Image (cartoon, coloured by chain):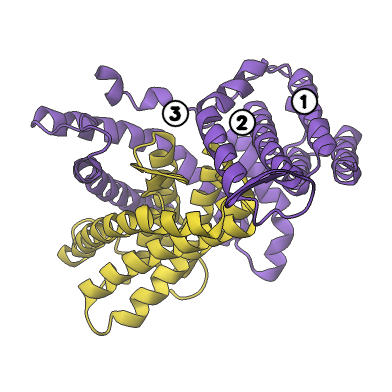
Amino acid sequence: MSAEFELTRNITIGQYLPTGSVIHRLDPRYKVTAFVIMILAIAVCNTYLGNLFALAVCLVMFRLSHIPLHYGISGVKPAVPFIIILAIMQLLFYGEIARGGTIYFQYGFVTISSEVIRLVVVSAMRFVEVIFLSSVLTLSTSTTELTHGMERLLGPLEKVKFPVHAFALIITIAIRFVPTFAMEMEKMMKAQASRGADFGTGEWWRIVKRTKDMFPIIIPLFNVALSRAEDLILAMEARCYTPGAARTRYAHYRATPKDFAAVGICMILAIVMLIIPW
Amino acid sequence: MEKGLTVRKIVIAGVLGAIAILLGVTRLGFIPVPTAAGNATILHIPAIIGGIMEGWGVGLIIGLIFGVSSFLNATVPLFKDPLVAILPRLFIGVVAYFTYVGLRQFNQYAAIGVAGFVGSMTNTILVLVMAVIRGYMPAGVAATVAVTSGIPEAIVSVIVTLAVVVAWKKIGSSGKQKSKISGDFK
């Protein structure tokens, strides 16, 4: 019961594992670029061999970054039932859409062909690969590095009047406030519970009741958040923060050949994933 | 006021983005409706509220934060695809804002409520359309999901949006808490 109120414990956002590996030391700008390339390649790749190759690449990344593999696996574990349900549904209902290939079995509307099986296997593998890749990225890069990296990467967009700095600031504020609001929410849940509200105790099929239970927490949460926002606005304006004004920064990034090499290698890997036949 | 991002817009977008992330991470933002897409969600509500309060730009940014965080936290393969998880979410706040602006001349409260409903429906419909296009679901299953999780989502969205936005508008009129430098109160 008490575990229900401890929201702050489950928040892994900004979890960072400092092992000081090669991947940790990459310039965040190049690291983010490299990961974006890989994720796009995985999203498009739909061959068995290509996905096997991608999976192998992910395992190598874990090795290189000295991050224990169980961090990645713990991300996959809660998803296993969903993957199975999705696979069964695709298998049953997809005969019509994924046409072609050899048909192994047909009964009524159920058509199981080699194309359907490919779809099922590839979407499950794709899912595991994306989880692995994104855990390597977030575990090897601190949130400050990530936002700085993103700000610099989007830099060219300043030319078309896109407010890059403001955007980076928004992300920083969002990440900064997650633990604060988690604490607020804990307080509110305890306060409501002490007045006799019960949440999370309704049976799962009583959807309406469970939904109603949420309102006394969600609505005050928004109000608390907005009044905190007012405080922050006042504080920033009092310090003459001007959006869009030129600013200097504390952290400077300088790209080394290693960073270029990393992006280059990822590009080659992505191309290999896409051209592998079968 | 119209041009660019003010301090107010930046902060509100950040704070509502934080709520979207928090509700997602703690899984409190999910209504356990047993459907093919997992759960119904209320994570899109910050985007709607941001859109109504501070304009379409803020709505778009919160939608982006929601999309990226749902992409990173997803336990369902469907949302591990950036085209399903991120792209449709950009439009939630934008649609909500234009609905609100279009209707507010008739009735403030009705406009907020309708914007909440339409914004929520935007999420449901666009995500499911992308899911069908990308081949995660056949159209029939998607239609069922639209009814079983889309409708409850829309109802919850109307209630929360109304409660929050109306309360927030009151803060301004009592002149107590809102920062006065950024102006714009009604």
- Residue at the far left in the pictured view: A195
Which chain's residue wears label 1? A
Asked if the residue at tag 3 contacts the one at tag 2, i.e. Cβ–Cβ closer than 8 Å, the answer is: no
Check disc 1 and report its element: helix, strand or loop: helix
For the residues labelled 2 and 1, say whether their Cβ atoms are less than 8 Å apart: no
Q: Residue at x 31, y 53 (%)?
A: A230
Chain identity for the colour yellow used in the image: B
Query: Do discs 2 and 1 share a chain?
Result: yes
Residues A87 and A188: in front is: A87
Report, in whole angstroms, how far the alpha carbon at label 3 lies from the one at label 1: 24 Å
Q: Is residue B135 visible?
A: yes
User: Image check: A158 left or right of B175?
Assistant: right
- Which amino acid, by three-letter code, is at mark 2? Ser
Which image quadrant: the N terminus of chain A?
A: top left
Which residue bears the numbered disc 2? A142
Give the letter of the chain under mark 2: A
Q: Residue B53 vs residue A89: left or right?
A: left
Residue drawn 83% across the image and 38% down it: A50
Q: Say few, some or many: other residues with alpha carbon within 10 Å of mark 2 (under 14 / 14 to 19 / 20 or more).
A: some
The chain displayed purple equals: A
Looking at the rendered structure, which numbered label has been put on residue B82?
none
N-terminal-most mark, 2 or 1? 1
Which residue matches tag 1?
Answer: A61
Viewer-nearest of discs 2 and 3: 3
Residue at image location 69% in from the left, 55% down from the top = A154
Q: Tell me the quarter of the picture where residue A84 sits.
A: top right
